[in-house]
Amino acid sequence: MLTAMQNLGEYVLSLLREMGRMLLFIIYALYRIVRFPGRPVHILKQINFIGAKSFFVIFLTAAFTGMVLGLQGYYTLTKFGSEGMLGSVVALSLIRELGPVLTALMVTGRAGSAITAEIGIMRITEQIDALETMALEPFKYLVSPKIIAALIAVPLLCAIFDMVGIFGGYLVGVKLMGVNPGAYFHEMQKSVEWKDVYSGMMKSLSFGLIISWICCYKGYYTTRGAEGVSRSTTAAVVMSSVLVLVWDYFLTSILL
């Protein structure tokens, strides 16, 4: 019993140390962004990597998500004779919830894992130590540009996701199932308010911060060689995805 309690106490202390180190990491990263955000060319390079190179996977995911929403929404609404509300169902589902969350999950899988692996490899090959030895700030070159780029790219990708998803729902609902196009867009315009768009943008902005924070942190503190890089990458993707879903619940309860 004493050994079990000791092991539990050590686990709790290690968890608290990890949480404290993560908090200090993001505080210092934000401080460096405010003081020395880094060269614009580095930020643009990361925007291209996180944003532009994620466009194709976001486009495909959004198109088929909107088409599935259009199909399922149509068959559900026909039971109540409310096919004209399809535009509202598709738009509100995408703008408030599915757009920000699925965008964040796709960016985590495509760009977040690569960010962790990149920084992790630099750690185990002692490139970060070399920067520190030369009195160069690693955060300025490795962390700050990625966080700034994620804060810019993820909301833009979310906006693209929403538009493509709405058009996908239009293709299925109007062109395939025969919903009146005027009713589709009229009900959408009538039901979608500014607070819905604001809610979705706030979520995508915070998700961008979560993804860049967790992925940079896991890569920065990678240990134990190639095995450590693989573990850090897996942990970063899992933790980022879980935190996105948990934070989505809290933000939804606050912004409703």
Image (cartoon, grey):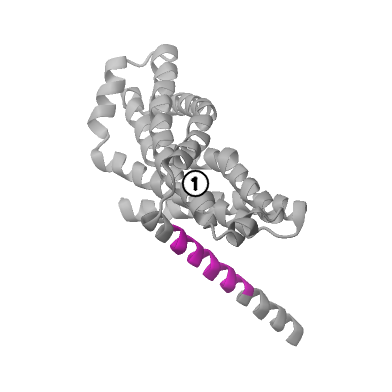
Q: Quadrant of residue 16?
A: bottom right
Q: Amino acid at mark 1?
A: Lys
Say whether residue 98 is left or right of residue 119: left
> Is 69 placed above or below 2 here?
above
Q: Nearer the viewer, residue 157 or 166?
A: 157
The crowd level at tag 1 (other Cα within 10 Å; few <14, some 14-19, many 20+) is many
Q: Secondary structure at mark 1?
A: helix
Q: Which residue is mark 1?
A: 146
Task: Please report the bounds of the magenta region as a residue range.
Answer: 14-29
Q: Nearer the viewer, residue 88 or 20?
A: 20
Q: Main secondary structure of the magenta part?
A: helix
The N terminus, quarter of image: bottom right
Determine if the magenta segment contains residue 19.
yes
Query: Picture coordinates of residue 249 (x, y %)?
Result: 43, 53
What residue is drawn where x is 55% and y is 49%?
241
What residue is drawn where x is 35% and y is 35%?
92
Query: Picture coordinates of residue 254 (x, y %)?
Result: 33, 56
Say whether residue 71 is left or right of residue 220: left
> Is 123 placed above or below 145 here?
below
Q: Nearer the viewer, residue 173 or 26?
A: 26
Determine if the magenta segment contains residue 42.
no
Query: Picture coordinates of residue 146 (x, y %)?
Result: 49, 46
User: Can residue 245 be seen at all in this image of the molecule?
Assistant: no
Query: Picture coordinates of residue 130 (x, y %)?
Result: 64, 57
Toward the front, the furthest residue is 134
Q: How many marks?
A: 1
> Is 118 placed above or below 73 here?
below
